[in-house]
Every structure is written in structure tokens, then in C-alpha cells.
Amino acid sequence: MSNILQLSDKHSLSVERLTMAFPHNDRLLVALQGVTLEVERGELVCIVGASGSGKSTLLNILAGLDEPTAGRAHVHGRVALMFQEAALLPWLTAAGNVELALELRGVKRSERTEVARELLHRVHLDGFEKRLPHELSGGMKQRVALARALAQDADVLLMDEPFGALDAITRDRLHEELERIWTESGLTILFVTHNAREAVRLGDRVLVFTSRPGRVGHEVKVDLPRPRSLDSPELAVIAGRITDRLKQEMVD
Ligand code: ADP
Ligand code: MG
């Protein structure tokens, strides 16, 4: 195998000089300009950036929902997406939502019930299989959304502020769950947040986005042992530095 192949094989996701501009009134709004990044297979990388810095735009491009204006984005393997809103189908039960993802993946009808039950077990929703979305709390809905993402048997999970609407305690629990699932599964995760502490809690690395246009302004490797506590002083120091950078960005 050539060096080039070996190098690319290590990466699960790569973005090269990516630019995205939207028509806005009579001019162009440049949401992303020259974004370059790489994520290794099995890595958990967080992107932190102010609102409007193009984080969602980047994920949409990686998910294949949008075409970039210039540059390249490449993901190896199957992609699953998770958003701030769980976006469950309201007329289907928790299990039904997961089974639908299994059906779309081609899992046989006879196996779907059992696999869905197992996936809901992995996100600690035993006993809630038959509940409809409106009968579930916000945290439970995101657990179902996570089970549904796992049902897609993806290689890469793209998460766009998935816990942004949850209370602190629920969010803390979901950080633990996500970390456990990530460790067990070997998934590659790109996790977007505007919260520096959340980024440091979860990420092997944190990419700090500049504000409009967005690009990777700074990278922080997080060497704290896992599991990390959101309230630990070590984490707060690193998050504090990231927040300072974000504030500088917003003044400019
Ligand atoms: P973030 O997720 O970091 O908050 P977004 O990626 O949603 O930022 O948006 C980045 C910028 O691009 C914003 O100024 C937003 O208004 C603009 N934008 C995003 N999507 C579109 C679109 N489909 N059409 C026009 N402008 C858009
Ligand atoms: Mg966004």
C-alpha cells in the first residue's frame, strides 16, 4: 500500500479548504472560508464556535445535505446525524422510531423488534419502548435519537448541539452515555457545540471556530483522563482559555 493510501485510511473524515457562501440580499454571505480539518477513525472531536460561525453549515455539507461553494469534504463510510431537536416521528413509539431506521437499513422485519429493544437498552431506555415521543422527557427523546443513530450502523456520527436544550443534570448523564457508547462502538464522532466546557468534557481535540466567516482558528488537544467531570478545575482552566478566544473572535 502506498503512503498516501495509508494516510487517508487512518482518517475517517477530511475537509480541505472548504468555503460556503450563501446569497444574501444583493451580496454573498460567507459562512465558511477555507476550513481544513481531519478526524481520525475512532476519534471524538468537538467543534466549538459562536452562533453563526458556520458549524451547522459544515455538518450539513459533511452529511451530504449541501454542496460547498469550493473545496472538498469527504467522509469514509456511513454517516448518521443528530440535532438539538430529536426530530422523532410523533406517531411512532420509541421502538417504532428505531425500527424505522432499521427498516431503512434493510434489517429483516423479524429481527427489528429485538434489535430495537437492544439499542434502546444501550441508551438505558428499557421499559420505555412503547412510549410515544410526547410521553418522553427531552433527555429521553435524545436517547431515542441516539439509539436511532446507532440503528443506522454508521461509521461517523455528526452531532449538532445535541444536548443544547437539556438541563444540566440530564446533559451530564448524556455525556456519560455518549462517552460509553463511543468507547464501546469505536464510532468516529464530530460533536458541535457553542459550550466550551462541553467541548472539553467530551473531545480528544477541540477545534475552535472563528466567527463569520468560520474556519478553524485554533486547536486544543485535551489530555485530561476520562471520564472527565464538567466541574473539575482542570477542565475549567482549558475551557476558560477557549472561551477567551471565542470572546476575542466576537469583538473583531
Ligand atoms: P452556527 O451553526 O455556527 O450557528 P450556521 O452554520 O447555522 O451557524 O450559519 C452560519 C451563517 O450562514 C449564518 O450567518 C447563517 O445565517 C447563514 N446561513 C446558514 N444557512 C443558510 C442558508 N441556507 N441560506 C442563507 N444563509 C444561511
Ligand atoms: Mg448551528
Image (spheres, rainbow, N blue to C red):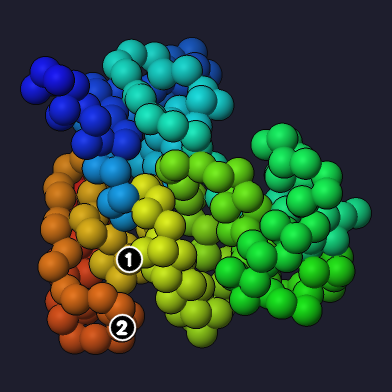
Q: Amino acid at mark 1?
A: Leu
Q: Quadrant of the C terminus?
A: top left
Q: Secondary structure at mark 2?
A: loop
Which of the two residues, 83 or 41, is positioned nearer the viewer here? 41
Q: Residues within 10 Å of mark 1 (few under 14, many from 20)?
A: many
Q: Give the residue number, with chain letter if any, for mark 2.
A: 229
Q: Which mark is residue 202?
A: 1
Q: Residue 248, position in %: x, y? A: 18, 54
Toward the right, the furthest residue is 91
In the figure, is residue 192 to the left or right of 6?
right
Which of the two residues, 222 or 26, is positioned nearer the viewer here? 222
Q: Amino acid at mark 2?
A: Ser
Q: Quadrant of the N terminus?
A: top left
- Between marks 1 and 2, how big is the CA–CA gap? 10 Å
Q: Residues within 10 Å of mark 2 (few under 14, many from 20)?
A: many
Q: Quadrant of residue 101?
A: top right
Q: Residue 113, position in %: x, y? A: 80, 57
